[in-house]
C-alpha cells in the first residue's frame, strides 16, 4: 500500500470524538463486572457487545438483511475484468463469507481489515478477513494484528460510513434490549404488581419476609393457576398492572429506531411507523428501496476501497452488480420485432470471465 494512502487511512482513524467503549464480541464479562458497573455508573456505562445487540430480534433481522444481501451481490470491474481473488479464495472461508463478515464488521464497528498475500509485482493474489478481536489501532492510528504492527502492504483497511451500530446506535439497541427484558418479566408475572401488606403488629424477620414473598411469587407462576394463601395478618394490595399495550407498541417503536440506526427501511424488519399504510409493492420495488435507502452507503464504502490502486489496477472501478437483484423476474419478455424492423442491440456484456469468474491481469483462466 502506498504510504500516502495508508497515512490517509490512519488519519481517518483518528478523526472525530473518541467513540464509546465497545465490548469484544468474543469475550464474556466477569460476573463481578456485570454487577458492579451498572450499580455504580448506570447501564449506559456498560459496553454494548455484539452478542447483546444480536439478541435483539430487530438487530438480528437487520444484520441478516444487510450482510446477507450485500454478500450475495456479485462484484464487477469497469473497465477490464474482475481480479479472480475477489471472486474466490483458497481457504475454507468462501468469498461469500469473507464479504458477509466484512459487512458485519462495518455494520457493528465501522471498520474491517483484510490480510492480503501479494505476488512479486505487488498484485494481490489472496485476501482473508481478519477477525475483529485480533486487530486494533495503536495511539497513532497504525494497525496492530495480534498485538504486533504489520506492514501496510500486507493488509487492506476498509473504513465504513460511521462508527458502527454498537457506538452510534447504542441507545436504540440498548433500549430495545431493555424492552425485551421488561417483556420477559411481564411474561413471568401473570397478574398485577402486588404488595403483601401486614395488618398486625407482630414483627417479621427479613428471612420470614423473603420466604413469604418467594412463596407467593412461586405460587403466581405455578401450575395451580396463580392461587396462593393468606391469613388474617396479610392483606394483598394491587399496585397496577403491566401495560401490555405499551410493551407491544414500545417494542415496535424500538424496532423502528433500530432500523433507523442500522440504516434500512423499517418495513424491511417488519416494523411499522405511525404513518405507515398498506400499499402494494412488488419484490423488485422492495429490493430497489432496500438498495437505494439501505445498502448503498455500505456497498459504496467497500467498492470505493477495493477500487484504490493498492487493491486493483490503476483506473479500475469496482462496484456491486445490483441489476439482477432489483429487476422484476415476472416482467414480460420484450416482443419480437416486426418484419423489417431493426432489432434492439444487445446490452454490453458484463466484465466477467466465462463461468462468472474474474481473472487477474495477464493471467489465463485455469481449466
Image (cartoon, helix red, strand yellow):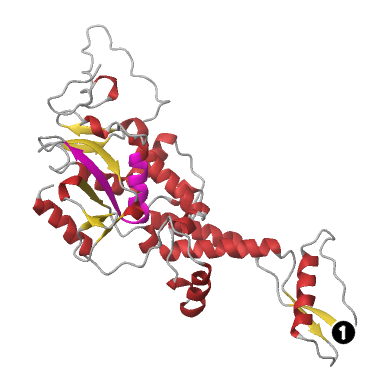
Residue 26: image location, x then y, percent: 43, 55
Q: Which residues are magenta?
A: 98-118
Q: What residue appears at the point 36 percent right and 52 percent down from the top-left corner? A: 107
| Mark 1 surroundings: few (<14), some (14-19) or many (≥20) residues within 10 A | few
Q: Is residue 282 above or below residue 23?
A: above
In the visual, does 139 lie left or right of 263? left
Looking at the picture, tell me which residue is in the foreground, 361 or 250: 361
Helix, strand or loop under label 1? loop
Looking at the picture, tell me which residue is in the foreground, 195 or 14: 14
Residue 202: image location, x then y, percent: 85, 91
Looking at the picture, tell me which residue is in the foreground, 12 or 171: 12
Q: Is residue 91 above or below residue 350?
A: below
Instruction: Note whether residue 223 is visible.
Output: yes
Residue 31: image location, x then y, percent: 53, 68
Residue 15 falls in image quadrant: bottom left
Residue 356 falls in image quadrant: top left
Taking the magenta stretch, the answer to whether it contains residue 23 is no
User: Which residue position holds label 1?
Assistant: 233
Q: Is residue 94 above or below residue 200?
A: above
Q: Is residue 98 above or below residue 275?
A: above
Amino acid at each position: 500500500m502506498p504510504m500516502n494512502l495508508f497515512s490517509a487511512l490512519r488519519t481517518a482513524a483518528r478523526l472525530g470524538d473518541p467513540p464509546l467503549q465497545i465490548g469484544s464480541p468474543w469475550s464474556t464479562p466477569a460476573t463481578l463486572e456485570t454487577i458492579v458497573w451498572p450499580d455504580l455508573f448506570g447501564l449506559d456505562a456498560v459496553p454494548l457487545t455484539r452478542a447483546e445487540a444480536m439478541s435483539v430480534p430487530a438487530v438480528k433481522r437487520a444484520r441478516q438483511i444487510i450482510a446477507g444481501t450485500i454478500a450475495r451481490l456479485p462484484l464487477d470491474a469497469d473497465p477490464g475484468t474482475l481480479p479472480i481473488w475477489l471472486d474466490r479464495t483458497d481457504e475454507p472461508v468462501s468469498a461469500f463469507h469473507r464479504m458477509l463478515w466484512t459487512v458485519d464488521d462495518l455494520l457493528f464497528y465501522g471498520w474491517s481489515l483484510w490480510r492480503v498475500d501479494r505476488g512479486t509485482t505487488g498484485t494481490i493474489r489472496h485476501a482473508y478477513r481478519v477477525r475483529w478481536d485480533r486487530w486494533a489501532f495503536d495511539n497513532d492510528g497504525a494497525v496492530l494484528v495480534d498485538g504486533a504492527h504489520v506492514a501496510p502492504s500486507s493488509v487492506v483497511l476498509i473504513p465504513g460510513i460511521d462508527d458502527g451500530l454498537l457506538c452510534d446506535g447504542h441507545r436504540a439497541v440498548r433500549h430495545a434490549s431493555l424492552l425485551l427484558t421488561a417483556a420477559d418479566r411481564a411474561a413471568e408475572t401473570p397478574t398485577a404488581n402486588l404488595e403483601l401488606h401486614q395488618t398486625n403488629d407482630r414483627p417479621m424477620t427479613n428471612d420470614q419476609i423473603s420466604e413469604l414473598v418467594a412463596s407467593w411469587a412461586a405460587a403466581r407462576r405455578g401450575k395451580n393457576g396463580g392461587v396462593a394463601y393468606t391469613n388474617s395478618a396479610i392483606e394483598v394490595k394491587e399496585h397496577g398492572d403491566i401495560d401490555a399495550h405499551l410493551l407491544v407498541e414500545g417494542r415496535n417503536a424500538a424496532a423502528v429506531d433500530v432500523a433507523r440506526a442500522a440504516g434500512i427501511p423499517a418495513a424491511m424488519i417488519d416494523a411499522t411507523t405511525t404513518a405507515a399504510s398498506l400499499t402494494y409493492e412488488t419484490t423488485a420495488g422492495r429490493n430497489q428501496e432496500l438498495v437505494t435507502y439501505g445498502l448503498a452507503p455500505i456497498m459504496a464504502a467497500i467498492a470505493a476501497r477495493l477500487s484504490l490502486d493498492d487493491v486493483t489496477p490503476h483506473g479500475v472501478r469496482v462496484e456491486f452488480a445490483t441489476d439482477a437483484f432489483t429487476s422484476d423476474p415476472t416482467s414480460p419478455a420484450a416482443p419480437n420485432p416486426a418484419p423489417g424492423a431493426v432489432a434492439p442491440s444487445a446490452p454490453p456484456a458484463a466484465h466477467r470471465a466465462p463461468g462468472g469468474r474474474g481473472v487477474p491481469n495477464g493471467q489465463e483462466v485455469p481449466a
